[in-house]
């Protein structure tokens, strides 16, 4: 490394976020950027620790120390080449990845100030696009054709890798554009959709074909292909089937998030179809990232108030002895959406939805729970305490995750990738899965 002692003198500096009063009035990206000089200083903090746990923790196996050193030395094109050797879409992970690498950074364990790996990653790819390092390439064709069902991160990654190996790749998707949850689930204030379009345009220039607005029956795959990759994600959201579920005003989280993204893209919806929290008291059920995305979206739509409830206990702040490294640290996560204003409550289960004579939602009866250690270990057991109350609300957003999809028995030339294979997970894991499946497809067809 150029400066193996920089971590002693250069403090961690994050780019920060736009002021709350400014950002809640639009859907522009919340995160700001550092200037190039400060970004190079941040890259210098990588301490050449010998055993790079960051590399080990990354599902993609990114070579963080190598490209950090290149950035520190001002060799941005070299950094770009090292980064994209393992990551097909750094512009996605550089914005929305929870940075497993930073949780494993030695500086995180020593002084609770890891290298700003995620932000540095995003800076590299954005510099590469600005400077023209990113250019379409054309590959010699091998005469084989592969169909990919689903244009989310796993499908896109598989398409990139197979295209580079010379396969004629066609990506089918039921939506009108590519990206999957990148486009239709993640809000623009976290990932502006021009970032997705920029990448898929490049893929088309390199020879990948997209067929949109095409619903594929997985039991009747399109003919004429040598292999198939099923990467259609986890389409079924976990429901809450309690009394009053049919009341007006109860939606799945993705119904709100997807429609809002489509409206920002210019799609028109009839007033009767529009899902909006404007002027409403919103209750978000579910404490994960999707719930957080709902909170930020509701702020920007003009909700009167937003409350988020979670059935699990409140995690500790900062560190958690129950989940030591190398486990994922289960600690309280406060997102930019939470900072914008939200009442958060834990250990609450929902008993029933309450409505008026018009069939409209007016509240949710909740009850406190406690979690007791299982007698023989394993997952703790939930116990109802009996303390009940009604949370008044006009809109409920169900953000409780997704069901792992079930698949029929496919032919040997059909492969699963991403969430369709593993169940709902991280974008970075979906990209890694797409790369892995592309290798499997190539090995399978190379034998034929």
Image: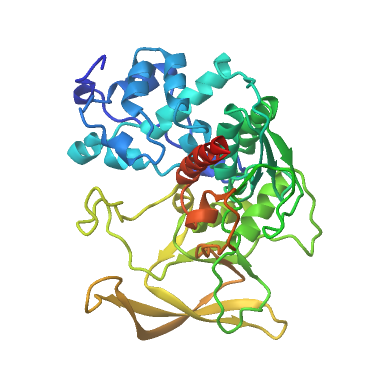
**Residue 315 at what x, y percent from top left?**
31, 61
Q: What colour scheme governs how the chains and residues are painted in the rendered image of this protein?
A: rainbow
Can residue 18 be seen by looking at this rendering? no
**Residue 334 at what x, y percent from top left?**
39, 52
Q: Locate residue 211 relative to residue 29 in the image: left or right.
A: right
**Residue 37 at what x, y percent from top left?**
39, 16
Q: Quadrant of the N terminus?
A: top left
In this view of the protein, which residue sits in the foreground, 292 or 172?
A: 172
The answer to which quarter of the image holds residue 61 is top left
In this view of the protein, which residue sits in the foreground, 84 or 365?
A: 84
Q: Residue at x 37, y 72 (%)?
A: 347
Q: Locate residue 8 relative to residue 349 in the image: left or right.
A: left
The answer to which quarter of the image holds residue 362 is bottom right
In this view of the protein, which residue sits in the foreground, 51 or 441?
A: 441
Q: Residue at x 42, y 84 (%)?
A: 388
* Vertical side of 131 occupied by 27: above or below: below
Q: Quadrant of the C terminus?
A: top right
In this view of the protein, which residue sits in the foreground, 308 or 117?
A: 117
Q: Residue at x 58, y 15 (%)?
A: 132
Q: Residue at x 63, y 67 (%)?
A: 251
* Vertical side of 217 occupied by 196: above or below: above
Can residue 87 be seen by looking at this rendering? yes
The answer to which quarter of the image holds residue 281 is bottom right
**Residue 291 at what x, y percent from top left?**
50, 59
Q: Residue furthest front?
A: 448
């Amino acid at each position: 490394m150029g400066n193996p002692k920089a971590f002693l003198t250069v403090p961690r500096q994050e780019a920060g976020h736009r002021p709350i009063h400014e950002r809640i009035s639009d859907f522009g990206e919340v995160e700001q950027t550092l200037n190039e000089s400060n970004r190079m200083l941040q890259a210098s903090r990588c301490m050449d620790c010998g055993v790079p746990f960051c590399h080990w923790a990354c599902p993609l196996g990114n070579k963080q120390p190598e490209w950090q050193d290149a950035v520190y030395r001002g060799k941005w094109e070299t950094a770009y080449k090292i980064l994209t050797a393992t990551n097909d879409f750094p512009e996605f992970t550089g914005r929305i990845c929870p940075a497993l690498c930073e949780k494993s950074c030695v500086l995180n364990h020593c002084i609770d100030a890891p290298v700003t790996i995620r932000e540095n990653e995003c800076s590299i790819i954005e510099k590469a696009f600005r400077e023209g390092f990113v250019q379409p390439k054309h590959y010699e064709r091998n005469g084989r054709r592969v169909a990919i069902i689903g244009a989310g991160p796993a499908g896109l990654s598989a398409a990139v890798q197979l295209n580079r190996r010379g396969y004629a790749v066609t990506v089918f998707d039921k939506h009108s554009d590519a990206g999957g949850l990148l486009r239709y689930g993640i809000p623009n204030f976290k990932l502006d959709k021009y970032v997705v379009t920029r990448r898929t345009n490049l893929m088309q220039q390199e020879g990948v074909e997209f067929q949109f607005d095409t619903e594929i029956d997985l039991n009747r795959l399109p003919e004429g292909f040598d292999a198939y990759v099923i990467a259609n994600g986890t389409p079924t959201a976990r429901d809450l089937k309690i009394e009053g579920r049919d009341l007006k005003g109860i939606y799945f989280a993705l119904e709100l998030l997807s429609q809002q993204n489509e409206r920002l893209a210019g799609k028109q919806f009839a007033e009767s179809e529009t899902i909006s929290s404007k002027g409403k008291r919103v209750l978000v059920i579910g404490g994960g990232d999707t719930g957080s995305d709902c909170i930020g979206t509701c702020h920007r739509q003009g909700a009167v108030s937003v409350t988020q409830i979670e059935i699990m206990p409140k995690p500790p702040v900062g560190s958690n002895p129950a989940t030591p490294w190398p486990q994922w640290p289960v600690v309280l996560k406060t997102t930019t959406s939470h900072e914008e204003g939200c009442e958060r409550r834990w250990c609450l289960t929902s008993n029933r939805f309450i409505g008026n004579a018009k069939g409209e939602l007016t509240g949710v009866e909740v009850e406190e729970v406690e979690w007791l250690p299982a007698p023989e270990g394993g997952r703790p057991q939930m116990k109802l305490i009996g303390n009940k109350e009604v949370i008044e609300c006009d809109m409920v957003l169900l953000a409780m995750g997704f069901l792992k999809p079930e698949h029929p028995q496919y032919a040997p030339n059909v492969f699963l990738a991403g969430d369709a294979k593993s169940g709902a997970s991280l974008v970075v894991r979906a990209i890694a899965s797409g790369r892995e499946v592309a290798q499997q497809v190539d090995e399978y067809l190379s034998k034929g």
